[in-house]
Image (cartoon, helix red, strand yellow):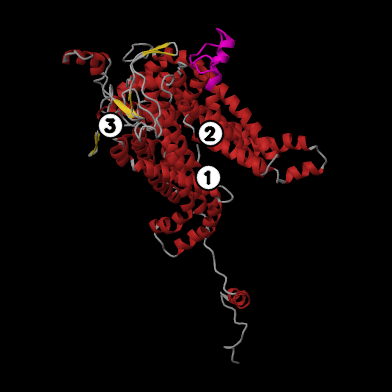
Amino acid sequence: MATTDTSTDFTLDTAAALAADEHGTIEGKSPWLLAWRRLRRNYVALSFLALFFLIVIACALAGPYARHIAKTGPNDNHLGETFARNGKQIPIVSKGGFVNGTFVAGGIPVGPQLWHAGGRYVFGADNQGRDVSVRLLYGGQNSLKVGIGSGIICMFFALILALVAGYFSSWADWLISRFFDLIWAFPVLLLAIALGTALSINGFHHFGISIESGSLWIPTLVISYVLIPYVGRPLRGQILSLREKEFIEAAKAQGASPVRIMASELLPNLASSVLVFFALIIASNILTEAGLSFLGAGVQPPSPSWGTMIADGQDRIVTAPWLAIIPGIAIVLTVLSLNVFGDGLRDALDPRSKIRMER
Amino acid sequence: MLAFVIRRLIGALLVLVAVSFITYLIFVKIPGGDPAPRIAGRTATEQNIQDIRKKLHLNDPFYVQYWGMMQSLFSGSLKSYSSQLNVVNEIKKGIPATLSLCIGAGIIWLFFGIVVGVVSAVKAGFWSDRVITVLALIGISLPVFWLGLIVRYFFAQGHPLSVLPDGQYVPLTVNPYEWFIHLIMPWTVLAVLFIGFYGRVLRSNILDTINEDYVRTAKAKGLGSRRVMVKHVLRNSLIPIVTLFGLDFAAVIGGSAILTETVFDLKGVGQYAAESVQSLDLPPIMGVTIYATFFIVLFSVVVDLLYAWLDPRIRPT
């Protein structure tokens, strides 16, 4: 009755063992590996990701660029000064007068020099003689800080609220859903400019938190607050369907605590959505910041940001079009690169493309 | 169905109350929001400021102030703190411009979105897919105010291509031709943001619907492909677009319209809002917020009802 050496003793790995005899070992591929393989083939998405990193690095190098190449700070005025181009001295801001038949009050700043002036005034000067390329890089730092910072904060709170709401679905869910509905019903931009303007007068000094007016934290927090439901609502929806799955039931049966279930069962299943949303939310935050700053409710002057640079340039668009056009191109490239990459990431992580940000 | 409508309407009313209350709190509680010193001007004495406080009831508890403000808003007697103009009249003055802008842009983006979506679904393949993806991604990546400035620069401000009038709003009742020609740029700028996105959503809806059983049945019973496309595929694919359109339209009234009106100087409600926010003028902000929230809430109710009417499967009982 000895059955120990029988070859029909099936175990869990029998199929793999049998296959190994024929073709060599079959290795399981994790979903992340499969997603990475899909993403790796998407050259468009990857090159736009590279473009985004290029922009980030360029903005991070604003300090050395300003010191060693442009030799001027972002807020330094150069009215009445000249610079050398091919040995000739050119005024940075010309005197006002008639241009193409129309009278222009105030001076006309010098246009983009590209590389002809030895790295100075690459993108021209603005009406106070400030170097546009230096301001563009410093402004980019501010825009990216606000965009990425508010993206992180917004994602963090949206995720926690969605987890609590979706998992407990009791009064907590009711409360959080109504909170989402309420911010959702607010006209986003109106709420943001109202908060931004009100806060930037004296800053915020309540509840032991002290934020000075003109601080970058004001636009960052305002934007992350008003955009929470745009991420939180779809995430909550996903959790509602996940919590009915068997593996959650199994975890509960094993006696796992709610926090443990959220952290080690729900969160990994949300990871792909979170990644995609993160890329997309930063893009939309940079756009919102630009809109806010354009209306004067975001980054406060004299600190540059791409939005305030466009606002400064809008009155001079006929005589000095580069003032408004160049920061706009910077915004479009940054936002587009994030959107294209986010789109590719979604295709890779979720080929049936169910992840949609509610707008 | 009636119970559903009533429930939605009550919910909408509660949201309106909550939104107005929160707006009020933001401006009363946040430092710098106290209007009395600003109204009194620079040379005001403490006594002047106290008088203004009393006149505007700023010393009352905030819920009394809130109630008073809501009463005067709905009776139409609310006045701005800084310009002393009647808020309700100012909003009424701006509504034609804002609605002309939003409805016109909405029609354009819906029409072209549907055309682009249908064409790219019928000609599904590598190139149509790429073109519509690029359109959609560029649309959602453009800052509307920047696009507005650029379009103004090229088509209205002395550039050789300048053929359109620059900014401003001419009422439809005054001169329909001027009204149209002044709004072409703002409409296009606003619509460009959405056309690609709508086309892309519609395209993927159509491609999903084409595989449904009822489409196969329609084909099997010998209907022409055009008829199948319009009557069976498109009709069902448009349902999600209706939802999207309602929400986006409301969001545009309370969002992108502010930027577009400011750039093109259309003197609509959005521009009024932006100007009053910059001077921290509470009454107009309350008025405009309520007005914009009213539209957002109204459209979300309309969308829900329309959705239930279009798709009997989700009709609540």
Report whether mark 2 lies on the same chain as mark 1. no
The residue that label 3 is drawn on is A214
Q: Is residue B48 left or right of residue B125?
A: left
Q: Quadrant of residue B202?
A: top right
Tell me how many marks there are.
3
- Residue at point 33%, 11% (across, down): B84
- Amino acid tagged 1: Asp
The residue that label 1 is drawn on is A343
CA separation, marks 2 and 1?
14 Å
- Amino acid tagged 3: Gly
| Chain letter behind tag 1 | A
| Crowdedness near tag 3: few (<14), some (14–19) or many (≥20) residues, C-alpha within 10 Å | some
Asked if labels 2 and 3 touch by Cβ distance under 8 angstroms, the answer is no
| Crowdedness near tag 1: few (<14), some (14–19) or many (≥20) residues, C-alpha within 10 Å | some
The numbered dot on residue A307 is none
The residue that label 2 is drawn on is B139
Report whether mark 3 lies on the same chain as mark 1. yes
- Residue at point 60%, 32% (across, down): B242
